Amino acid sequence: MFIATTFAPFDLSAQPFAYISNQLGDSVSIIDTATAKVVDTVKVSGKPAGVAISADGKKVYVSTPEAHGFAVIDTDKRVVIKTVAVGSGSLGIAASPDGKRIYVADWYKNIVAVIDAHSFEIIKQISVGKSPSGLVVSPNNHWLYVANRLDDSVSEIDLNDFSIKNTRKVGKHPFGITIDSKGEKIYVANVQSDDVTVLAAENLKRLGNVKVGALPYAVSLAVKDNRLFVTNQDHGSVSVIDTKTLKQVAVLEVGDKPEGIATHPDDKHVYVANWFDNSVSIIDGQSLKVIDTIKTGAGSRAFGQFISK
């Protein structure tokens, strides 16, 4: 179930790439966003799932749950240059804005591992809630927010001393998480309660809940943080929320079982990985239309921030 129309390439001064983890195909598809074409495919073993990109865009970090860690892809050579052992439940992954650290959530050990981005050594393991999944770092590099799926909570970690400042209950089974560009609001997709929880980043105070479609998985902001896009796995759709009114303003049909979602640096185009359709849908965040669908690999998941800047 998807909508595909003729795609007109948009004008960009740079040409970011989207890195789509294909979990069932043990690969990562590389999409040139200027042409909306897959330009290369990198073999990544271990059922790749989560994706993060280094601040300088030179490396892509891909979590590999079955290989118990993550793979490092060189974006120039387009090959895996290193694999890093972390834990048997490695899933959510994020890179720090200063390029110094990588964070990996271990689903089984209930920890977040802090990895030095140069030596790839684990420098700290932080105990969080049950089954940590989505991770997001604040724009000022001070805080790390963790969605703890089986604890129905979000943890706030101070990255200066790796202490947990706050933990807040949200909806049922939170998974995907994002933060706005000012570092003021956090949005969490709750898979089992079919809603999104909005929190104040400063103290994790609950600001609201918004009902969306069935099994919301991941979230991404666009159009100057005015619109939140939410993948609904069981509806084959993306809900669009007005972040000022906290109202759902549109529901867009995409591919079957949409999972990962990320916004292009132009702040307008939103990319959605469709697990069952082995594809990526592109949404125009202003017109709220699906403008293209790109075939990728088997089981496209792309959980995390998968578009380079």
Image (cartoon, helix red, strand yellow):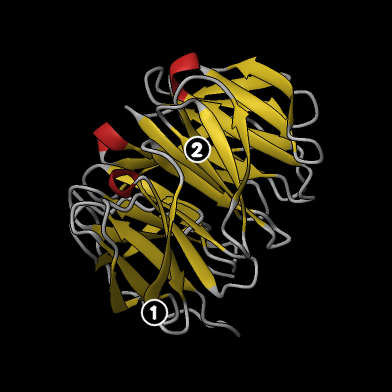
Would residue 41 appear left or right of 169 to someone viewing this image? left
In primary-sequence order, the first of circles 2 and 1 is 1
Residue drawn at the location 54% of the way across and 69% of the way down: 308
Q: Nearer the viewer, residue 215 or 39?
A: 39
Residue 230 seen in render: no
Q: Determine whether label 2 and label 1 are within 8 Å by CB.
A: no
Q: Quadrant of the C terminus?
A: bottom right
Q: Amino acid at mark 1?
A: Arg
Would residue 294 appear left or right of 252 to someone viewing this image? left
Q: Nearer the viewer, residue 153 or 102?
A: 102
Q: Amino acid at mark 2?
A: Ala
Residue drawn at the location 26% of the way across and 51% of the way down: 47
Please tell me in which quadrant of the rendered image residue 36 appears.
bottom left
Would residue 28 appear left or right of 163 to someone viewing this image? left
Q: Is residue 260 above or below residue 265?
A: above
Q: Categorize mark 1 by other alpha carbons within 10 Å: few (<14), some (14-19), many (20+).
A: some
Residue drawn at the location 54% of the way across and 20% of the way down: 129
Residue 280, image x and y in percent? 30, 60
Q: Is residue 112 above or below residue 298?
A: above
Pointer 1: what residue? 78
Residue 90, image x and y in percent? 41, 41
Task: Name the disc covering residue 105, or none.
Answer: 2
